[in-house]
Amino acid sequence: MSKTLVEVLRKNYETLLERVEKACLRAGRSLGEVKILGASKGQSEEKIKVLYSLGLKLFGENYVQEAEKKIKNLADLDIDWHFIGRLQTNKAKKAVMLFSTIHSLDRLSLAEELEKRAKSLNKRINVLIEVNIGHEATKAGVFEENLEEFVGELKGFPSLNLIGLMCLPPLTDDERKTRFYFQKMRNLFERIKPLVGEGFTQLSMGTSSDFEIAIEEGATIIRIGTLLFGPRM
Ligand SMILES: *Cc1c(COP(=O)(O)O)cnc(C)c1O
């Protein structure tokens, strides 16, 4: 393992922690309320290992095949693996086996398949509903106007533990727009919470480019890729 790689990743991680801490201070939140998820798609196992040794224990993958290899090779490490990408129904079984948590539940057919697979594996899997907060044709996710109905439908799936909401807002340089979408997510989260109950606690939003705004608006999980790891392969 090269010294420079360790030094670069240490610097990235420390800088990120400082910025997260400052954003928490500004928002009057405690550091413990915000979890950092290392978005490790297209990043090497070596880099994951280094970040793990620096204290990062939560990683998120986008592709089941890529993740399967990494999770096998890094099985010795006590990593909590989340799935954050688009999930094809025919990969649901593998996903249930590999991950503790799926951030990208976006349709009933996927919920049905996850329920079936989780049940037969005797496992309860955490899920977040992905919300298409900008109504973008290119993005997955439930529209906000359909969210309550979808949450109601999930009541029939005992193997799915609904813990929160996730979004990827429209890409823009305009901070006010980004903040507007995150505020919308926070409001949706508060509206859905009483419908689900106790375990509904997670708001997964914010990436390298907008995590500080996300924290200010209530994110509990931020998903950081390039800022932590550097460019993807
Ligand atoms: C890749 C990815 C991220 C991380 O994005 P960066 O800009 O690299 O921080 C976060 N969330 C999802 C869903 C992703 O696919």
Image (cartoon, grey):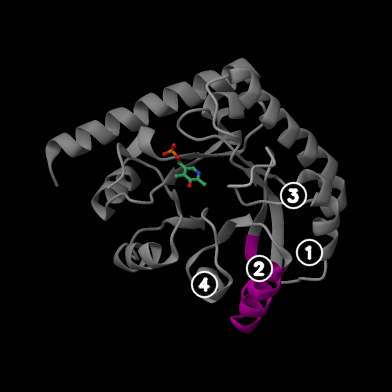
Q: Can residue 112 be found in the magenta stretch?
A: yes
Q: CA distance from mark 3 to mark 2?
A: 20 Å
Q: Nearer the viewer, mark 3 or mark 2?
A: 2
Cα–Cα gap, marks 2 and 4: 10 Å
Camera-side mark, 3 or 1: 1
Name which residue type carries label 4. Lys
Residue beneath disc 3 = 200
Q: Position of residue 81 (x, y in %)?
A: 47, 57
Q: CA distance from mark 2 to mark 1?
A: 11 Å
The quarter of the picture where residue 13 lies is top left
The answer to whether residue 177 is above or below residue 232 is: above
- Tag 1: Cα neighbours inside 10 Å, few (<14), some, or many (≥20)? some
Quadrant housing residue 67: bottom left
Q: Which residues are magenta?
A: 109-126
Residue at image location 38% in from the left, 49% down from the top:
40
Residue 133: horizontal and vertical position, in percent? 69, 40
In the image, the residue with mark 4 has its CB under 8 Å from the nearest atom of ligand 1: no
| Residue at the image point whose x is 46% and y is 55% from the top | 62
Q: What label sits on residue 49 in the rendered view?
A: none
Q: CA distance from mark 1 to mark 4?
A: 20 Å
Mark 3 and mark 2 lie on one chain; the one further toward the N terminus is 2
Helix, strand or loop: magenta stretch: helix
Circle 4 sits on which residue? 91
Q: Which mark is residue 110?
A: 2
In the rendered structure, which disc, 2 or 1, sits on the residue that comes first in sequence? Answer: 2
At mark 3, the secondary structure is: loop
- For badge 3, the amino acid type reads Phe
User: Residue 209, percent across and down?
Assistant: 47, 28
- Give neighbour class at mark 3: few <14, some 14-19, many 20+ (Cα, 10 Å): some
